[in-house]
Amino acid sequence: MVVDYQPMYGGAHYDPDPAGGAVSRLDLYGTADRGGPVIASSATVTRRRPGVYRFELPEVPAGRYWGMVTFTPSDGAQPVKDTSLLLDLPLGLGLVTSPEAVAKMLGVPLPITADQRGDLEAAIRNAQSDVVAYLGRPVVPRIVSLSAATPCWTDNLEDTDAWPLPEQDDIVQVSAYKDRGDGTYDAEFLVGLDGATEQPIVRYVTAHAAESERQRPGGVGSEGRRVSSVSAEGQSISYEQAPPAGQAGALPTLDSLSRLRRKLYAPLNRPHRAPFPYSGYPGRRRHYY
């Protein structure tokens, strides 16, 4: 199992490598105070790209874990402890949120049972499908790999225009790259929208998955539905619905995700340009509409 991590230092994301520092260890705990026994730990870490490090962890049971990462911010500095990492495992299920996050919103105590996990995963996928239909695009990116690729320039390998990628999508991220030592690189890219990193999508799916389970008879957390009235004889019960849109506590609407809808673009017709650096600006021009 692998976990990608961005160091947090002084209230900001920070890469210790340029200053001679290093990320050294990840410990997972089963409680938020991180005072109990260590559930799992790893000192096997690689720098995937500037500011992103990958740990290799042993397999652990599904559930919520609180992480503590040890790293030195610069050469000769004292090690620091970063407690910003919260993990809901397992990863890699194609979900933008987790059953634990939905259970917390429902007020269901953790850890959840296997049956509860299955019901909450189904609710998440249903809410996620609504987002996919509205945006007209998947919310889980795909991985594209290049082997022995020669970049157009090497001063900014985080720029996707530096790589000989075909026109893929309006969203492409450089995931990792490795110098082969002969002027070529092995590189990985995330192509498409990564919904798990977009807070509006995470909030929408979490809230709607929770509300759908709250309203479903026998659903996870359905016993916590808000009662508005009970008949004198106890023969009928009325339940409150979620607050109307625009009020505090209201469910987010699909309109809140409008900026993430797919942009259509096409390359502009232009004459052939000499190779960089002789042609000036190295990027590719795109026309969005």
Image (cartoon, rainbow, N blue to C red):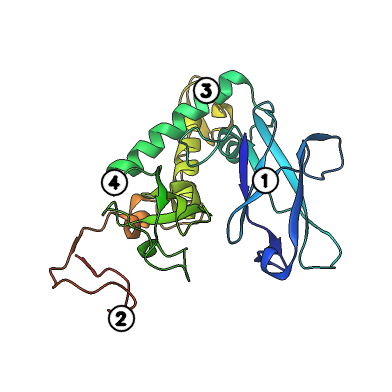
Q: Kindly tell me whether residue 231 is visible in this rendering.
A: no
Contact? badges 4 and 1 (CB < 8 Å) = no
**Amino acid at circle 2:** Gly
Residue sticking out furthest to the front: 182
**Residue, disc 3:** 118
Q: Indicate left or right for 143 with 39 as reference.
A: left
| Distance from the alpha carbon under mark 1 to that under mark 2 | 45 Å
**Residue, disc 2:** 280
**Residue, disc 1:** 86
Q: Judge whether 99 appears above or below 24 on screen.
A: above
Instruction: Classify mark 1: residues with Cα within 10 Å, few (<14), some (14-19) or many (20+).
Output: some
Can you give x and y, in whole percent of width and height, for residue 216 in the image? 45, 26
Numbered label tally? 4
Q: Quick one: SS at disc 1? A: strand
Rendered image: mark on residue 39: none
The answer to which of marks 4 and 1 sits earlier in the sequence is 1
| Distance from the alpha carbon under mark 3 to that under mark 4 | 25 Å
Identified at 37% across, 65% down, the residue is 152
Q: Quick one: SS at disc 4? A: helix
The answer to which of marks 1 and 2 sits earlier in the sequence is 1
